[in-house]
Image (spheres, helix red, strand yellow):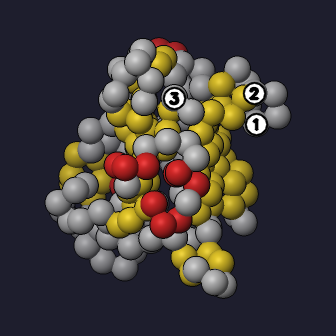
Amino acid sequence: GDLVITEINRQPRIGGATTVSAAMWFEVYNKSTRAIDLSNWYVDRTSAIGTDRFTVDPASLVVVPAGDYAVFCASTTYQSSATSAYPLTCDYVWKDSTQVSTYVGTYKDNTFNLQRDTDDLRFWIEGDSSTGRKISEVHWYYDAVNGYWPRDARFSTSLDPAHLNETDNDTRTNWCSTTATAA
């Protein structure tokens, strides 16, 4: 419970109806009193289209200080049009710009795309999904009674700051769409 997934920008549509996969990102929060080194942590997601995964490269030195956040991005720059590129501040980039659409190895995955309507996101330590220990997970979905989790294609989905823990981030009502200025 020391690391909590707190914000997700999934299948964003920046400035139009087309998904801009380079603008996908998610944020984690360290609620402990010590720094957490994410080297070799395994990250995966699973939806109806399949499972994608990557391992945090130790050479990237992703260490989250106590009470601080880390941001994982598909790219450090995304475009909202043919001429407008916007930078992202990222602690780790999971895609490799030299490889267009193929899985590129342990530390990068070009097919890792967070689905808008139904998907999950998980962090593992000391191994992968079959051998490791799950540290944080969020699963967003549609159900007939409550509908979709917040899923505005223009903004990220954020966990209410009053619920920054691994139990509360599993509850749909603790998440909301951010505003235009939040991202």
Q: Are marks 1 and 2 in contact (CB under 8 Å)?
A: yes
Q: Quadrant of the C terminus?
A: bottom left
Query: Residue 165: percent from the left, percent from the top?
Result: 49, 42
Kindly tell me whether residue 75 is visible in this rendering: yes
Q: Which residue is mark 3?
A: 2
Name the image quarter holding residue 143: bottom right
Q: Which residue is mark 2?
A: 132
Alpha carbon of mark 3 to alpha carbon of mark 1: how far?
19 Å
What amino acid does circle 3 point to? Asp
Compared with 151, 6 (above or below) is above
Q: Earlier in the sequence, mark 2 or mark 3?
A: 3
Query: Residue 161: percent from the left, percent from the top?
Result: 34, 49
Task: Name which residue lies at 52% across and 51% down.
Answer: 169
Task: List the single residue furthest toward the right.
Answer: 130
Name the image quarter holding residue 73: top left
Task: Name which residue lies at 30% across and 77% down.
Answer: 16
Q: Secondary structure at mark 3?
A: loop
Q: Residues within 10 Å of mark 3 (few under 14, many from 20)?
A: some
Alpha carbon of mark 2 to alpha carbon of mark 3: how far?
16 Å
Q: Which residue is mark 1?
A: 129
Compared with 31, 77 (above or below) is below
Q: Residues within 10 Å of mark 1 (few under 14, many from 20)?
A: some
Q: Residues within 10 Å of mark 2 (few under 14, many from 20)?
A: some
Q: Secondary structure at mark 1?
A: loop
Task: Name which residue lies at 33% across and 29% down.
Answer: 68
What amino acid does circle 1 point to? Ser
The mark closer to the camera, 2 or 3, is 3
Toward the viewer: 182 or 60?
Answer: 182
What amino acid does circle 2 point to? Gly
Task: Name which residue lies at 65% across and 25% down.
Answer: 125
